[in-house]
Amino acid sequence: MDLSLDLDAFALARDAADPLARFRSEFLIPTHRGQDMHYFCGNSLGLQPRGAQRAIAEELNAWATNAVEGHFCGERPWMHYQSALRDSMARVVGALPSEVVVMNSLTVNLHLLMASFYRPTKERPAILIEAGSFPSDRHATASQVQFHGFDLETDLIELQPDGPGGTISMAAIERVLEEHGHRIALVLWPGVQYRTGQAFDLAAITKMAHAKGCMVGFDLAHAVGNLPLALHDSGADFAAWCTYKYLNSGPGAVAGAFVHELHARRPDLPRLAGWWGHRAETRFLMAPEFDPADGAEGWQQSNPPILAMASIRASLELFDAATMPALRAKSLELTGYLESLVRKHLEGVIEILTPAEPTQRGCQLSLRVIGGRERGRALFEYLADNGVLGDWREPDVIRISPAPLYNRHTDVLAAVRGIRDWAST
Ligand SMILES: *Cc1c(COP(=O)(O)O)cnc(C)c1O
């Protein structure tokens, strides 16, 4: 075993010097054979903040105590519950509060936003996505193309990866926009690609696509809470994200959406409306005409599920306290540490698919297990048996995502040691 005691000393010292170390104790860490699990699945389902149970209990309590009056009284009247969340959420994504709304789920939000921002014409019918996108994004865009009566063969353009590890270069995006931009109505792009962990420059993509007259939306499922974002400055038309991954808000938690300020007061934009999107001041006059609220809130449909929103409040309190720049600083160190250990100790066992350039990734490294699917599965199961939980992507990839809110250098070392032990048996 060549992973010596020096390495333990180093990892323990880095953890002791970590200014965000206290946040780990704000989470419930699952155990494996009585020990804290080394949990690297924050890209799939973030851990439960200790505050979540209390936050939900408070709203159950408000319901018990105040019943219908809870909409207007108590510490957090339900009428305004969403607006209280959106300020913190806006900080996480780098947007104006009025550009952000917490509602629905991710795929639903993509559809609702495409209803407004994907307006295909005969001359300009197409959507551009990345090949190998998350299935829901492909289903959503494909069904939108078909819903408008256009042809998947020609009007869903899927850009093939051209870089190492299945990554996509900016040059490839530029080329496809050069060639097809005049036919593209909408570019829907990931902030961080779920399979490779590649992070994209949202502002650069927006600029290139806008220059060709395309609308631009981002799916930030793997970017939000992972990287600092500057959604407003990026100029993107819209974005959507879920909150159960790096935002730790619980399984199927309510999602987020962004609509750029440029579209804030455009009642002319077609939308699939509901009463909660109506201007709050006059909503309860219950008039038949729809007068949309300014900003992203004008895309709401229903009154929000307060019990489900409560866990988001608990989670965002932690992001407000930790702040994205500090989380990013720790994340760069933690993922850089993982990368250096893999390169030093796992040569011939693991190939890293995620870009080596830190500006082109978040916390996740996608590790391809050399030797094919069976070896990959065997390693994945060995790790799980030994309390190291990453997540599996067919056919041979294990994603390891050290989340700076709760992961430590010692977790990363345990993961690399686990792989090393398996490889040397
Ligand atoms: C996680 C994820 C989804 C999941 O969609 P839901 O509507 O929340 O079930 C969709 N797209 C991407 C890119 C994801 O990473």
Image (cartoon, rainbow, N blue to C red):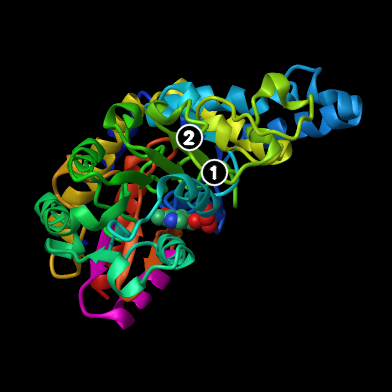
Task: Determine which quarter of the picture holds residue 1.
Answer: bottom left
Q: CA distance from mark 1 to mark 2?
A: 42 Å
- Image position of 134 with respect to 288: above or below: below
Specify whether residue 363 is in view: no
Residue that appears at 41% across and 52% down: 40
Looking at this view, is 196 or 424 the one in front?
Answer: 196
Circle number at residue 271? 1
- Image position of 297 with respect to 224: above or below: above
Task: Determine which quarter of the picture holds residue 235.
Answer: top left
Crowding at mark 2 (Cα within 10 Å: few <14, some 14-19, many 20+) = some
Specify whether residue 342 is in view: yes
User: Start and end of the magenta stretch?
Assistant: 363-385
Residue that appears at 41% across and 64% down: 145
N-terminal-most mark, 1 or 2: 2
Rendered location of residue 229, percent (x, y): 33, 32
Rendered location of residue 10, percent (x, y): 24, 38
Residue that appears at 88% across and 29% down: 68
- Residue extending farthest to the front is 122
- Image position of 343 with respect to 230: above or below: below
Given the image, on which type of amino acid does mark 2 rest? Arg
Task: Determine which quarter of the picture holds residue 83.
Answer: top right
Ligand 1 is within 8 Å of the C-beta of the residue at disc 1: no
State which quarter of the image contains the C terminus.
Answer: bottom left
Residue 373 part of the magenta segment: yes
Query: Where does label 2 land, which residue?
Result: 24
Ligand 1 is within 8 Å of the C-beta of the residue at disc 2: no
